Amino acid sequence: PRVRLRPEYPLLPTDQKVDRAVVTETGAGGIGCNKFYETYGKRGQTGGLMAAWCTHCVCLGFHCIPKGEGRNDVFSALFTRWAKPPKVVIYDFACALGPYCMMREPKFFGETRFLIDGFHAKGHTRCTKACFISAYKKNSPELAAVNSSAAECGNGGLLKIRRPLSYMSQRHAITYAYTYLATWNRDRRISQARKEGKLSTL
């Protein structure tokens, strides 16, 4: 459920605009990530679903995006749906998401670490290693045990409904995706309970 509204930031002229980055000889301008530029800046963005996942591959929520996933989608979801910010946010463009969030709500995200998972770290050649979860795993047992690719696993599951969704109206697509993810979450929770010995197998 929504716990607060997303504020407007009139002193930030690019607020809520579509993300774009330009790579120059000295680095990636605008967003500051050359991988973001390679992914979105050249070929543009397409719409779809953005889902938030916990480390057990359980979907915490999703929403439809008209032009393609951007930093505002993630920022808005975190700020409007979390009463307290998560301690760690693992995202494939955390290098750009962290500054985006801190420029808007530094008090809210002051204790949050934004990290890039191991799967997506390759290609972030201009980004600081302070954004990579691999840089923290040696000294942080808590992060060492985290499945940083849980979102990739979950998004892989969403690929199964990609084609049928493309033929549906927005209303039907949202209902279909909600039902699919509710079933997905139920299966994941049952599987996790069996692993922990809290549920007997039939």
Image: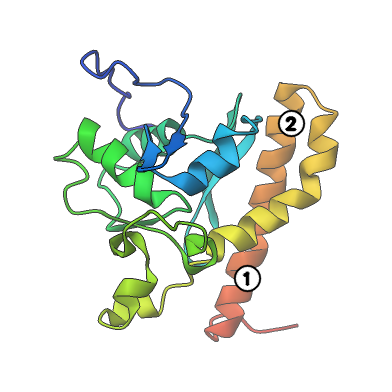
* Residue position marked by numbered label 1 in the rendering: 190
Q: Assess disc 2: are there few (<14), some (14-19) or many (≥20) residues with their C-alpha within 10 Å of its C-alpha.
A: some
The residue positioned 60% from the left and 25% from the top of the image is 67
In the rendered structure, which disc, 2 or 1, sits on the residue that comes first in sequence? 2
Q: Position of residue 156 (x, y in %)?
A: 69, 57
Q: Secondary structure at mark 2?
A: helix
Name the image colouring: rainbow
Q: Is 131 placed above or below 146 here?
A: above
Separation of residues labelled 2 and 1 (CA atoms) = 26 Å
Q: Is 154 placed above or below 188 here?
A: above
Amino acid tagged 2: Ala
Residue 35 left/right relative to 180: left
Q: Toward the viewer: 47 or 41?
A: 41
Say which quadrant the C terminus sits in.
bottom right
Q: Is 106 placed above or below 20 here?
A: below
Q: Residue furthest front?
A: 25
Q: Nearer the viewer, mark 2 or mark 1?
A: 2
Q: In which quadrant of the rendered view does residue 187 lie?
A: bottom right
Say which quadrant the N terminus sits in.
top left
